[in-house]
Image: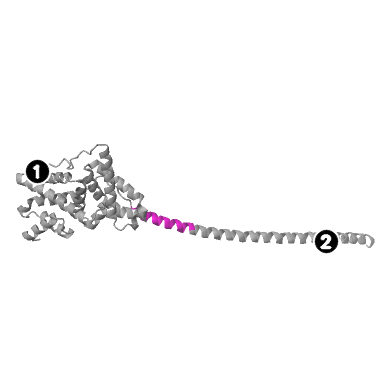
Amino acid sequence: MEFNKDYISELLNLYKEGETSLKQEQELKLYFSSEDYDKEFEAYAKLFKFFEIEYKTQMEDQVKGTDKKSSSFWINIAASICIVLGGLWFYDYYQNQLEMEEARQAFKTTQNALNLLSNNMNEGLEKLEYVDVFSTQKNKLIK
Amino acid sequence: MASEIYSRQILPLQDKIFRFSRRLLSSEVAAKDTTQDVLLKLWKLRKQLRDIKNIEAYTMTITKNLCYDLLKSKHSRTLEFVHNNYTKPGSCLDSEIEARDEASIVLKLINELPEQQRAIIQLRDIEQFSNQEIEEIMGLNSTSVRVALSRARKKIMNELKKTSAYGIQ
C-alpha cells in the first residue's frame, strides 16, 4: 500500500496528541510493518515494531477448556430415554402381573366351587350304597 | 450454559490478561499468577457472564484491579518486583538480537512511565481497545484518557528520538 509522507506525518502528529482513531493507528502500524518507511520516522518505527512484538507474546502453560459439554449433553438425552423406556416396560410388566393375579384368583375360586360341588355329589353317592345292600338282600330271598 | 461462555469468551483472553498484568507488575511470574487469579475469579462469576455487555473490557477491569491491589500491598511492605528481562535466551541471529535490542529500549521507556500511563498505552497501542473501553476499564473520563495517552506517547517519542540521535546506547 502506498502512503503519502505528508499524510503519515500528519497522522503521527495526531497520534502524539492522542487524537488518532483505532483505524488510523492501524494504518500507521501497516505503514511501519513494511520495511520501506521514511527514515525520518525511524524512532516511530521502533515504537510500532515493539507494539507488534508485544502483541504477539503469549503466556506459556495456558489453561485449556475442554469441550466435554456436547458429549455429556447427548449422554443426558440417552439416559433420559433409557429411564422413560424402562418406566414404560415396568408399567407394562406390572399391569400384566396384576392380570395374572386376577386370573389366578378366579381359577382358585372356580376350583373351590367345583370341589364343593363334587364333595356334595360324593355324599349323595354314599346313600346310594343302601340301594346296593337292598338288592343283595332281595337276591337272597328271591332266587 | 455458563461454562461454555467461559471457555469460548474468557479463555482466549489469557494472553491479553497476561500481557496487561505483566505491563503493570513488571514481572513475568507475578503476571502468570495474576492471570490465574483473574481466570479463577471469572470462573466463579461465570453464571453472571451473560449479563455483561463487554466481557473483554470487564476482564481487563478485573485484571487492573487485581494488579493494583497487588502493587499496593507490595508497596506497603516496601517490596518491589524485580524487573525481569522478558526476552527469552536461545536465539543467536544478529538481526533478531538487534530487533530485541530496539524493542528493549522501548520496553524500558514504557516501564519507566507512571502506572496509569503504562496501563493506557498497553490497552490502546498494544491491545487496541477503543477509548470508551479504556475509560470503562480505568474508570476515567474521556479527557483524562486522551491526556494520559498523549503524555505517554510524547514522553516515549522524545526519549526515543534522543537515543536514535546518539545511536543505540
Which contiguous range is marked in magenta? A67-83
Q: Position of residue B75 (x, y in %)?
A: 25, 39
Structural distance between the alpha carbons of marks 1 and 2 = 129 Å
Query: Which secondary structure lies at badge 1?
Result: helix
Which quadrant of the figure has residue A105?
bottom right
Q: Which residue is mark 1?
A: B94
Q: Which residue is mark 2?
A: A124
Q: Is residue A22 left or right of residue A87?
A: left
Camera sees residue A27 = yes
Q: Is A121 covered by the magenta stretch?
A: no
Say which of A124 and B17 sits in front.
B17
Q: Quadrant of the N terminus of chain B?
A: bottom left
**Subunit of mark 1?**
B
Q: Position of residue B6 (x, y in %)?
A: 32, 53
How crowded is the residue under tag 2: few (<14 C-alpha within 10 Å), some, or many (20+)?
A: few
Q: Is A68 covered by the magenta stretch?
A: yes
The reply to whether callout 1 and callout 2 are in contact (CB within 8 Å) is no
